[in-house]
């Protein structure tokens, strides 16, 4: 989970650290604000009470203001990444007034504007003539750092104005931005670099880009998502992260039938279950054995090979004369043996009579898949209560939280979303619930 104390020194109690896309920068969200984050945008609003739908009209439920932060890799050959594409007239159409103001005193090149715009009036000509449209205040900040451009836009609700306190807290948030010393390349540049690295070390093999984010080496295809996530954590170790994976794929090209299709008696004790996102399995692993589970996850099966593993192909089942149900039973038996030989060490947060949260001490490739075992369900429910929310942002890590502490569940849910977006081997940003009925998806009522 993200630790607010790990890098940014601008924290107060209750503030939270967030990282921008591709870990290009970090910033501090003050306790006065709430935030929602996607892969491209970070959106800030004032924290506070949220009246129910029955208490306010739809118009009244619109926040007083919203600040949206966007980051992009500047490519002079791509017009949409040009700085001019983010000028006030583009972001806030029907500008009534626009003035240049002092840029934020950051080390990066910056510019700033303030102004007022009018919402576009929709409808017929006569409706547009007689209808009054509301105005809104806005602020715009643009920061440039090396090849990164950060654009922050603050906009009031229609008919409302931006007060000095709102502008000040938004500027304080932006002032906390700290750019990474080494900037990671965006995905397409990363893939191009991987292709060049592969061709340099294996010039006799045909290596090309394939699909949305894949690579094809001779007859083998690999998805680069996990390589890229690992690279984002250590962008200065590109070669050390990528080359071992390419070497493994190249070795597969040299394997004979006995290595590609080993006899069952030689590998039966190494068959293990593995959780995997269903969306990726359907595209990159469609020819391998998988069974649907919950929260958009699939149970897949691998041959454990110490430092790596191979997914079990449907052709292997045919050669082994084994059904999917028999494969699942074998894998679960091996998982139980693994769990007995490798007891799960955990950290428990809370009092002896009121445990609130549990996390594994050390990452492991088989940590999250332990959640398939009913014995672990019983231990979690005995410690944390009859119903337990569980986040599985990636393969190596999970967090279990007692539903007796809904505030903590909400905080953990946000952290799981952040970790899912940044960790390697991601699984799901959604939460599971373990109860007497088994495992289901958590629904925040």
Image (cartoon, grey):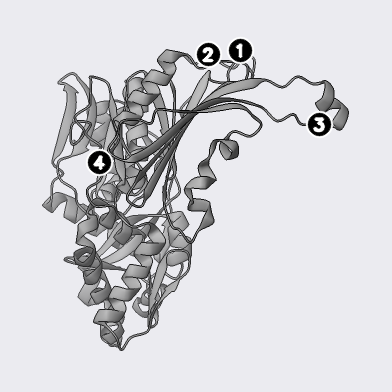
Q: In this view, does 259 lie to the left or right of 320?
A: left
Residue farthest right in this picture: 126
Query: Are the two marked residues, 2 and 1, in contact with CB atoms closer than 8 angstroms?
Result: yes
Earlier residue among tags 3 and 2: 2
Q: Quadrant of residue 18?
A: top left
Front one among 332 and 289: 289
Earlier residue among tags 1 and 3: 1
- Check residue 51 in the rendering and tell me which mark sits there, or answer none: 2
* Badge 3: residue crowd in 10 Å (few <14, some 14–19, many ≥20): few
Q: Is residue 360 left or right of residue 41?
A: left
- Check residue 121 in the rendering and tell me which mark sits there, or answer none: none
For the residues marked 4 and 3, what is the alpha-carbon distance in whole angstroms?
59 Å
Query: Are the two marked residues, 4 and 2, in contact with CB atoms closer than 8 angstroms?
Result: no
Residue behind mark 3: 123
Please identify, in this view, whether the residue under mark 3 or under mark 2 is nearer the observer: 3
For the residues marked 1 and 3, what is the alpha-carbon distance in whole angstroms?
26 Å
Earlier residue among tags 4 and 3: 3
Residue behind mark 1: 56
Say above or below: 155 vs 19.
above
Please identify, in this view, whether the residue under mark 1 or under mark 3 is nearer the observer: 3
Residue behind mark 4: 376
Please identify, in this view, whether the residue under mark 4 or under mark 2 is nearer the observer: 2
Query: Are the two marked residues, 4 and 3, in contact with CB atoms closer than 8 angstroms?
Result: no
Earlier residue among tags 2 and 1: 2
């Amino acid at each position: 989970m993200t630790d607010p104390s790990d890098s940014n020194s601008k924290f107060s109690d209750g503030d939270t650290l967030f990282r921008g896309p591709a870990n290009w920068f970090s910033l501090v969200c003050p306790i006065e604000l709430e935030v929602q984050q996607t892969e491209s945008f970070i959106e800030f609003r004032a924290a506070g009470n949220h009246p129910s739908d029955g208490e306010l009209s739809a118009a009244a439920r619109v926040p007083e203001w919203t600040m949206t932060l966007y980051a992009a890799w500047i490519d002079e050959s791509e017009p949409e990444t040009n700085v001019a594409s983010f000028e006030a007239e583009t972001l806030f159409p029907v500008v009534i007034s626009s003035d240049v103001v002092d840029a934020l005193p950051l080390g990066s090149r910056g510019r700033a504007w303030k102004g007022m715009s009018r919402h576009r009036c929709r409808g017929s000509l006569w409706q547009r003539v007689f209808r009054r449209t509301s105005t809104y205040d806005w602020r715009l900040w643009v920061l440039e750092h090396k090849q990164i451009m950060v654009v922050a836009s603050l906009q009031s609700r229609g008919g409302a104005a931006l007060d000095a306190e709102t502008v000040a807290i938004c500027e304080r948030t932006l002032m906390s931005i700290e750019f990474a010393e080494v900037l990671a390349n965006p995905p397409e540049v990363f893939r191009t670099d991987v292709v060049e690295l592969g061709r340099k070390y294996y010039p006799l093999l045909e290596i090309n880009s394939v699909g949305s984010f894949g690579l094809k080496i001779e007859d083998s295809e690999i998805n680069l998502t996990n390589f890229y996530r690992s690279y984002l954590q250590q962008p200065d170790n590109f070669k050390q992260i990528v080359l071992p994976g390419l070497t493994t794929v190249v070795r597969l090209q040299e394997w004979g039938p006995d290595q590609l299709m080993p006899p069952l008696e030689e590998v039966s004790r190494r068959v293990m279950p593995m959780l995997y996102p269903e969306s990726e399995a359907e595209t990159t692993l469609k020819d391998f054995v998988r069974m649907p589970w919950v929260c958009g996850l699939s149970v897949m099966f691998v041959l454990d090979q110490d430092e790596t593993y191979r997914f079990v192909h449907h052709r292997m089942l045919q050669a082994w004369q084994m059904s999917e149900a028999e494969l699942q039973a074998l894998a679960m038996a091996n998982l139980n043996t693994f769990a007995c030989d490798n007891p799960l060490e955990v950290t428990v947060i809370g009092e002896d009579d009121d445990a609130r949260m549990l996390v594994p001490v050390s990452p492991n490739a088989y940590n999250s898949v332990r959640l398939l075992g009913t014995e672990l369900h019983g231990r979690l429910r005995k410690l944390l209560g009859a119903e337990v929310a569980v986040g599985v942002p990636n393969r190596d890590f999970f967090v279990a939280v007692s539903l007796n502490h809904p505030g903590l569940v909400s905080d953990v849910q946000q952290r799981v979303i952040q970790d899912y977006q940044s960790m390697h081997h991601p699984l799901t940003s959604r939460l599971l619930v373990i109860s007497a009925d088994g495992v289901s998806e958590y629904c925040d009522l």
